[in-house]
């Protein structure tokens, strides 16, 4: 039974799949913090949050069973992603479900800001009728500068265009083609800042975007500019915004998000030009259902070991590439496990070489898979998420290379592991109709189907050696299912790989090791 802990409000309909899953126990403790959160997370397999719960390193490290943190929304700045990665915990979000709601909310703020709707509302319900104080401006023909042209920024642009605004966008990843598709003008940051009658930010909060709208930037804006932030508190320096409003540079600001939430008695709230909502961008019935459905499905997939889509701390793999690489998963994992078990000393370097069909295109997901398999025999708690991080932390050099030499196979791959004293390598291929095969072990050509319980013996090639091993195993009722031998030259170094039906008792292992012609014996589980 998996325990899924939910600590922020999520839509009931959205989490229906989780509630109905027979292998899941849902524990809903909304607003959990401090010691209570630490105590609940200790037994949770998954944590589901929105923006309120602060998922700190301490919380993550306390989650000894934790496999996934799911964010029902976009921004993951409340989650310590590097800490999750170090711990091997997958972080997923729901990037698409609240785009429209947040774009609509921003548009509502834009119109409210232009027409002073919240301020006017307050006076009317207080018994006043002051029409002169709330003269606004039209959106028609005004310039809207959008900083961050991703999902929400681009949806906002469509709505602004419908209101006949000129839309200018700055985003380092915005191509001319995409700008044309949305009918917006691509601009530099400074151009967008200088041209906007309204400036709205739609970037994530990162080291680069924190206080990207600051005193200096306000100075470069048009007089009477209006500012919106429905993305993340902290993108705009709130002190600089306050000063710019007081100085008259900025005519008004609409804020849905704040550097500290809830913001309490913020100085900005003393200014009549400021309108606010309490982080409501994604707060619609539709968005909340969408994001809860998305994360519930992702959590179930991850807990059940099925493929998932929206990991924040794993490189995303396009569906087409996933399909292309899927047939190689087993081969890569088995080779990795084989060489990982052959290597009994601290690893210094791992090189994976792809040739043939495998050398064409992106193979990074296979390399990550191989790394996890090799290192799983050397490091504790390793998984796809933390494998590259743990390798780097241990000073293990990982090389991925491609070769034009596929040794006569349609696809060929080799994993080489170096330690201070030794090196081992295993090559494999996919044989049409037969699946993965190991075709070489440490320079010994073989043909081994990599599965089951294997006995890997290094010995001197001499008459009777194979027979003696067989007799010894037979005398202890150990059946040999298949056997492969390989040698470089007659009478020289050789290897035996026996698939046996059960594990070897300790004393029998010692008896094998003591045979004159045998140099090493190792059990390998694949
Ligand atoms: N107020 C609310 O309730 C909600 C807020 N959000 C926030 O809105 C923001 C945008 O969300 P989405 O559009 O879904 O994300 P997105 O990832 O689709 O778009 C973000 C865009 O910002 C761009 N960007 C990154 N660094 C930049 C920089 N230094 N300068 C300019 N552009 C930069 C990226 O290239 C990307 O195109 C996020 O911060 C998210 O957390 C999202 C949903 C609801
Ligand atoms: O999705 C986002 O980034 C949001 O900011 C929405 O936050 P919320 O889920 O409403 O707390």
Image (cartoon, helix red, strand yellow):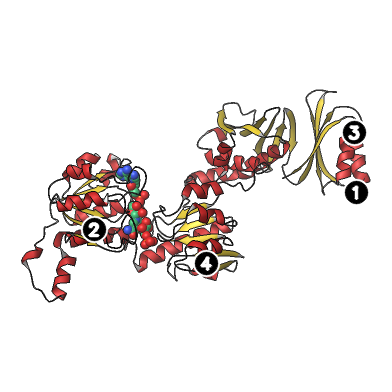
Q: Identify the residue position indicated by label 4 in the image.
A: 18
Number of the front mark, 4 or 2: 2
Q: Are marks 2 and 3 in contact (CB under 8 Å)?
A: no
Q: Which residue does the image show at 24% across and 52% down from the upper left?
A: 157
> Could you tell me how far apart the alpha carbons at marks 4 and 1 are, in whole angstroms?
48 Å
Number of the front mark, 3 or 1: 3
Tell me if 118 is positioned left or right of 61 in this view: left
40 or 465: which is nearer to us?
40
Q: Quadrant of ligand 2?
A: bottom left
Q: Identify the residue position indicated by label 2 in the image.
A: 267
Looking at the image, residue 107 lies above or below residue 408: below
Q: Position of residue 289 (x, y in %)?
A: 41, 66
Q: Position of residue 229 (x, y in %)?
A: 27, 54
- Mark 3 packing: few (<14 Cα in 10 Å), some, or many (20+)? some
Q: Which residue does the image show at 89% across and 27% down from the upper left?
A: 462
- How many numbered marks does the figure carry? 4
Q: Identify the residue position indicated by label 1 in the image.
A: 477
Q: Is residue 308 visible?
A: no
> Could you tell me how far apart the alpha carbons at marks 4 and 2 are, in whole angstroms?
43 Å
SS assignment at label 3: loop
Q: Quadrant of residue 374?
A: top right
> Could you tell me how far apart the alpha carbons at marks 2 and 1 are, in whole angstroms?
83 Å
Q: Position of residue 143 (x, y in %)?
A: 16, 49
Ligand 1 within 8 Å of disc 2? The answer is: no
Q: Position of residue 327 (x, y in %)?
A: 60, 44
């Amino acid at each position: 039974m998996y325990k899924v802990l939910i600590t922020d409000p999520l839509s009931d309909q959205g989490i229906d799949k989780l509630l109905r899953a027979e292998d899941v126990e849902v524990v809903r403790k909304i607003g959990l913090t401090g010691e209570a959160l630490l105590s609940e997370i200790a037994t949770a397999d998954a944590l589901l949050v929105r923006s309120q719960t602060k998922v700190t390193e301490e919380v993550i490290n306390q989650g000894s069973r934790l496999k996934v943190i799911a964010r029902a929304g976009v921004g993951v700045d409340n989650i310590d992603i590097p800490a999750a990665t170090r711990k091997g915990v997958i972080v997923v979000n729901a990037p698409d479900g609240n785009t429209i709601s947040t774009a609509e909310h921003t548009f509502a703020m834009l119109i409210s800001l232009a027409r002073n709707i919240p301020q006017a509302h307050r006076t009317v319900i207080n018994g006043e009728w002051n029409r002169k104080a709330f003269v606004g401006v039209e959106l028609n023909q005004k310039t809207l500068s959008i900083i961050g042209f991703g999902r929400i920024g681009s949806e906002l642009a469509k709505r602004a265009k419908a209101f006949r605004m000129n839309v200018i966008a700055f985003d380092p990843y915005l191509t001319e083609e995409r700008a044309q598709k949305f009918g917006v003008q691509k601009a530099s940051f400074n151009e967008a800042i200088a041209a906007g009658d309204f400036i709205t930010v739609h970037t994530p909060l990162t080291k680069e975007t924190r206080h990207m709208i600051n005193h200096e930037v306000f100075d470069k804006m048009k007089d009477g500019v209006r500012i919106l932030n429905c993305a993340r508190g902290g993108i705009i320096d709130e002190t600089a915004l306050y000063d710019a409003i007081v100085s008259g540079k900025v005519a008004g600001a609409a804020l849905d998000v704040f550097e500290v939430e809830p913001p309490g008695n913020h100085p900005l709230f003393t200014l009549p030009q400021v309108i606010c909502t309490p982080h409501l961008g994604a707060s619609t019935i539709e968005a909340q259902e969408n994001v809860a459905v998305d994360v519930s499905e992702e959590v179930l997939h991850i807990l059940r070991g099925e493929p998932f889509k929206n990991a924040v701390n794993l490189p995303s793999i396009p569906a087409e590439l996933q399909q292309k690489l899927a047939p190689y998963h087993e081969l890569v994992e088995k080779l990795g496990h084989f060489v990982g078990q052959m290597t009994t000393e601290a690893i210094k370097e791992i090189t994976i070489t792809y040739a043939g069909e495998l050398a064409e295109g992106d193979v990074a997901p296979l390399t990550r898979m191989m790394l996890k398999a090799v290192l799983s025999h050397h490091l504790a708690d390793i998984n796809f998420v933390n494998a590259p991080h743990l390798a780097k932390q241990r000073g293990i050099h990982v090389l991925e290379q491609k070769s034009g030499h596929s040794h006569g196979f349609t696809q060929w791959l080799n994993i080489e592991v170096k330690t201070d004293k030794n090196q081992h390598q295993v090559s494999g291929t996919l044989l049409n109709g037969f699946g993965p095969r190991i075709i070489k072990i440490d320079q010994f050509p073989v043909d081994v189907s990599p599965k089951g319980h294997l006995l890997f013996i290094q010995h001197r090639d001499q008459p009777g050696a194979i027979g003696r091993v067989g007799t010894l195993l037979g005398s202890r009722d150990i059946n040999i299912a298949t056997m492969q031998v390989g040698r470089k030259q007659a009478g020289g170094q050789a290897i035996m790989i026996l698939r046996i039906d059960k594990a070897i008792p300790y004393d029998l292992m010692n008896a094998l090791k003591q045979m004159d012609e045998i140099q090493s014996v190792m059990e390998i589980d694949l």
